[in-house]
Image: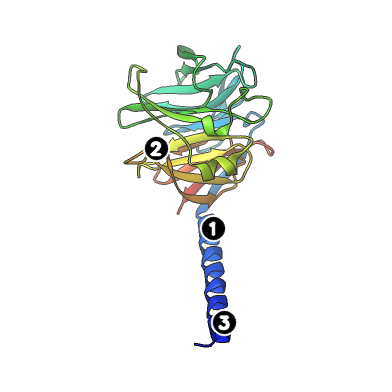
Amino acid sequence: MTPKQNNSLLLLKFLLSLILFAFITISSLAQTSTELFRVKSRHATQAVAVDSLHFYAISNARIVKYRKTSQDSIATWSGPLKHLNSGIVIQGKLYCVNSNYPEKPMASSVEIFDPKTLQHIGNHSFGIYEGSCTWLDWYQGHWYAYFAQYENDGGEPGKGVAYSTLVQFDAEWRRTASWILPKTLVERLRPMNLSGGTFNKDGLLYCSPHHDLELYILRIPKIGYELEWLKTISVPFQGQGIAIDRFQKNVLYGIHRGNREVIALKLE
């Protein structure tokens, strides 16, 4: 093979690698969901929770309950909380994560409500812990709580997004395991962090960033201490707390904070 032919072959390989990289990137960001509905709610600023018949728009210190069928609001709770971040309905109770963001030192708690009446019925305080708790879920007999660190005025000095931790607890809130974010995802999130997260029935974690219109699909590793980043999905959610509808197959709820909307999607 002549030098000229060799250079042509190297150029061809380089172009093919660029095409393959572009295909993988576009595929990972492709729209893989269908919008079911969106509802205006001025309280849709931090998160949404969902159960069999209702969804709940969550702001810093207020929860508003809506019917799924008519999207009418039917109940409201408001109280002296600092910064509600997310909500899930588990075994007949609504669990909401609360933090003191952007105050320091970071402190967080889980606030528990009766979803029928929205009466506050319980509390678990983490106090000062690994960071600011932004979301919580219950999966296969364990609690999973995510503690975020930031690289802005809300962050702790000397730390950053890389210090964020997903912590597994047992039913009595005893720590049993923890994981960190992959370095590539840390770079994508900086200076903010994951604002929402939930387990799907497939055992994968669906996580939302603070601003971007996308979801990150993560997996608990079988070996090591770093979460596995499998895929990125384009969605109309503008970050914040998300919720899997456990009563409808592959239906996910999120909010668009800028538009004050609750949005329901069917994942393909």
Residue at 60% across, 47% down = 236
Question: Residue 8 has which mark?
Answer: 3
Real-space CA distance between mark 1 and mark 2, rounded to the nearest whole angstrom: 24 Å
Measured as percent of width and height from the top left, residue 64 is found at 57, 25
Q: Say which amino acid is labelled 3.
A: Ser
Q: Say which amino acid is labelled 1.
A: Ala
Q: If you read the primary sequence from the N terminus, does the residue marked by circle 3 or circle 2 appear first?
A: 3
Measured as percent of width and height from the top left, residue 43 is found at 64, 28
Question: Residue 246 has which mark?
Answer: 2
Measured as percent of width and height from the top left, residue 253 is found at 51, 39
Q: Is residue 59 above or below residue 182?
A: above
Question: Residue 30 has which mark?
Answer: 1
Q: Nearer the viewer, mark 3 or mark 2?
A: 3
Residue 52 located left or right of residue 29: left
Residue at 65% across, 24% down = 154
Circle 2 — which element? loop
Residue at 44% across, 36% down = 198
Q: Quadrant of residue 161?
A: top right
Residue 72, visible in the rendered structure: no
Dot 2 crowding, Cα within 10 Å, few <14, some 14–19, many 20+: some
Residue 72 located left or right of residue 176: right
Q: Is residue 122 above or below residue 35?
A: above
User: Would you say the residues marked 3 and 1 are in contact, meaning their CB atoms lie under 8 Å apart?
Assistant: no
Q: If you read the primary sequence from the N terminus, does the residue marked by circle 3 or circle 1 appear first?
A: 3
Q: Say which amino acid is labelled 2.
A: Arg
Dot 3 crowding, Cα within 10 Å, few <14, some 14–19, many 20+: few
Circle 3 — which element? helix
Real-space CA distance between mark 3 and mark 2, rounded to the nearest whole angstrom: 55 Å
Quarter of the figure that contains the C terminus: bottom left
Residue 20, visible in the rendered structure: yes
Q: Quadrant of residue 100?
A: top right
